[in-house]
Amino acid sequence: MRYFKYIDIDNYQAVAHNSRAFVSEIYSKQIRDQKSIFQQIPWKIYLKYCPEILTAFSKYDLEPTSAFIYLIYNQAQAPLHIDTLSNTSNKCRVNIPIFNCEYSRTEFYTYKDMDLLLNTIWNKRAYGGYIELDETDVNVEKVDEVVVDRPTILRVQEIHRVLVDNINIPRTVLSFRTIKDPVYLLEEEDANC
């Protein structure tokens, strides 16, 4: 299974520049206070800063509809997790690096007994939202990693975590949800292997 794929997007320099301006201005308090966040961004405000994003993924037949900001300052703020487990949510999102991503990496994991994991999740909370996992669990096994230093499709419904160096901070990405799930680009590559 492919866990990530680098992609080329249209107007990348403008998207990167305008996205950095958006984050620097809209999230200046969180940056100043070194507050970690993972939240949906104000989409209409973002589009005023970066209208180029609406056509940036067009060559992949992907249309962005919303995005999340993931801003972290230390390893404790980036636990092993699954963003969501839902049949109605995309399995993948397009991540755009904003600040200090070249000094971090995203690691992907499998769980040796997925039925046990899913039963544990069902027993702890409703199926759907953000789920943290215990990094000391012997059933967790690392299978891949990527440095998100350019636009990258990531499987967010798989177990993963971000490793930061705690020096080059904050590590910041924008993670875009699209109408069509970008997972098809990873599955095409799986089929061709």
Image (cartoon, rainbow, N blue to C red):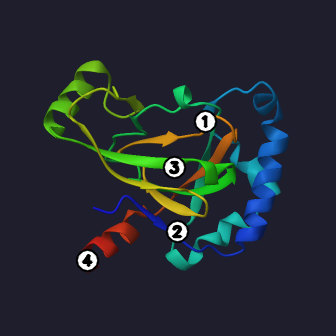
First of labels 4, 2 by sequence position: 2
Mark 4, other Cα within 10 Å: few <14 / some 14–19 / many ≥20: few
Marks 4 and 1, how far apart at CA: 35 Å
- Residue 144 x/y as whole percent: 36, 54
Which residue is label 4 attached to?
193
* Point 78% across, 68% down: residue: 14
Q: Tags 3 and 1 in contact by the CB under 8 Å rule?
A: no
User: In the rendered image, which quarter is residue 32 located in?
Assistant: top right
Task: Report the disc number at residue 105.
Answer: 3
Which residue is label 1 attached to?
39
Marks 2 and 3, how far apart at CA: 25 Å
Front tag of 3 and 4: 3
* Point 70% across, 38% down: residue: 170
Q: Tags 3 and 4 in contact by the CB under 8 Å rule?
A: no
Mark 4 belongs to which amino acid?
A: Cys
Marks 4 and 2, how far apart at CA: 23 Å
Front tag of 4 and 2: 4
Mark 2 belongs to which amino acid?
A: Leu
Q: Secondary structure at mark 4?
A: loop
Look at the image and tell me in which quarter the N terminus lies. bottom left
Left or right of 151 in this view: 11: right
- Residue 44 x/y as whole percent: 74, 49
Which residue is label 2 attached to?
62
Mark 3, other Cα within 10 Å: few <14 / some 14–19 / many ≥20: some
Left or right of 31 in this view: 59: left
